[in-house]
Amino acid sequence: MFCRYFRVAAILASLTPLAGCEPVSMTLLGVGAGAGVAHQMGGLAYRTFTAPLSKVRAATLTALRRMDIKVNKTEKLSNGEALYASVAERDIQIELEALTPNTTRIKAVARNGLLVDSATAVEIITQTEKAMGV
C-alpha cells in the first residue's frame, strides 16, 4: 500500500514543475499580450481593424510619433503598405494589409539583431488602437 502512495506522490511531484510553463504558453499564444492585440506569436503582433487602410495608416503614424519612432522608409505592397523604422538598436517593420475596403490588418515586428522584441511590437499596435479611439 505504501508503494502505491509513493508512486502517486512521485508522479505528482514530477508534474509540478510543468505548471510553471503555463505563463510562457499564455505569452506565446498572446493571452494577456495587450488589451486589443488579437494575436502574438514568435515576436510578431497582429491586429485586424474594421477601418480602411488609410485610417489605420494615419493612426499608425500618429502612434509612432507619440512613441518618438521615426519612419525611415515606406514601401507599397500588392494590397497594402510596409513601414520601416528603427529605434534603440531595433529594426521595426509594420505591414498594413487591406483585407477588404473597410478591413485592415496590421502586423508589427521589432528585431534587435536576431532577437525579437514583442513588447515593442505589441505597444505599437496598442498605441495605434488608442490613436483610432478603439
Image: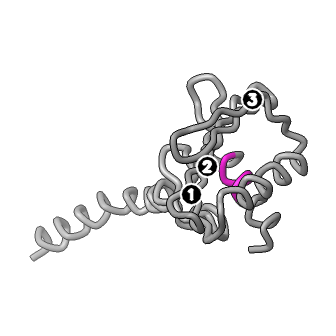
Q: Which residue is mark 2?
A: 96
Local SS, label 1 = strand
Give the amino acid at mark 2. Answer: Leu
Q: Which comes sooner in the sequence, label 2 or label 1?
A: 2
User: Is 86 in the magenta?
Assistant: no
Are the residues at dot 2 and dot 1 in contact (C-beta closer than 8 Å)? yes
Are the residues at dot 3 and dot 1 in contact (C-beta closer than 8 Å)? no
14 relative to 65, above or below? below
User: In this orientation, which residue lies closer to the viewer: 12 or 65?
Assistant: 65
Label 3, label 2: how far apart the Cα atoms are: 14 Å
Q: Which mark is residue 73?
A: 3
Q: What are the residue bounds of the magenta stretch?
A: 121-125
131 relative to 62, above or below? below
The spot of residue 123 in percent (x, y) is: 73, 54
Q: Which residue is mark 1?
A: 105
Q: Which comes sooner in the sequence, label 3 or label 2?
A: 3
